[in-house]
Image (tube, helix red, strand yellow):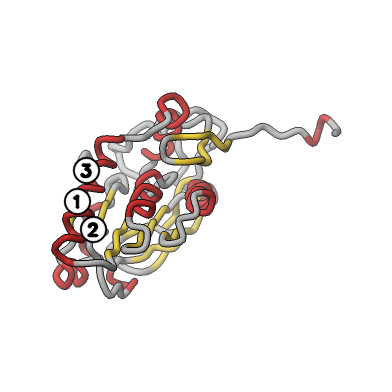
Amino acid sequence: MKKENRRPNAFIITQTQHGAMLVNRHDYGAGYQLLHFSSYDPDEVDLVLQLLELRRRYYGDGLVAMDGGANLGVHTIEWAKFMHAWGRVIAVEAQERIFYALAGNIAMNNCFNARAIWGALGAEVGSIQVPIPDYFKASSFGSLEIRQSAANEFIGQPLDYSEEKTSKTPMISIDSLSLHRLDFLKLDIEGMEVEALLGAEQSLQRCKPQLLIKKIR
């Protein structure tokens, strides 16, 4: 192989307690936990599994759980395995490269009851410009905020929000998915949680799902 054809690796496969997973070895968020501890937020994962079991007890089989801001898919995979034959997962991720890893992790773990969607959850249907970080530079990629503000968290590298340095990404509302059922909704979307809830008003009123919402921002 010619030296000029050699390329560095960012995403690698590692064995974890959640199964084989694609992770970015430069990520000091979820990737760091998976590489160094073989698991990611086990207490939170266990809490959700208990909630899903409780929901099933009162509402029966056919559960639909949405993982908003799925990142690499730890929650998605754990939920899908747990709900095999009685529930399904919809995983939404806005960063295109992270989405590819999410989809790969779903496939590698044979989660046929999980679906991955590339897009950002918002109040309406349209598009949004998503910053593109350098995935070879140590950063907390899951902490990337799509909306620029004076209070944006530093993820480990500066982000360029100009149009030419961002990726035009589909924006969807939860209501636009016209789900026949929504039993559980997790939102960890770096400050856009309220927008996503506004875009889910009809679904929330109709389905009354359990909610797990990050509130740091």
How many residues crowd mark 3 within 10 Å: few (<14), some (14–19), many (20+)? few
What secondary structure is marked by label 1? helix
> Tag 1 or tag 2, which sits nearer the N-term?
1
In the rendered image, which residue does mark 2 sit on?
184
Of residue 34 and residue 30, the one placed in the foreground of this image is: 34
Disc 1 marks a residue whose amino acid type is Leu
Q: Is residue 144 visible?
A: yes
Label 2 with label 1: CB-CB less than 8 Å = yes
Disc 3 marks a residue whose amino acid type is Leu
Give the image location of residue 27, x and y in percent: 47, 32
Label 1 and label 3: CA atoms lie apart by 6 Å
Q: Name which quarter of the figure residue 62 lies in.
A: bottom left
> Tag 3 or tag 2, which sits nearer the N-term?
3
How many residues crowd mark 1 within 10 Å: few (<14), some (14–19), many (20+)? some
Of residue 34 and residue 63, the one placed in the foreground of this image is: 63
Foreground tag (2 vs 3):
3
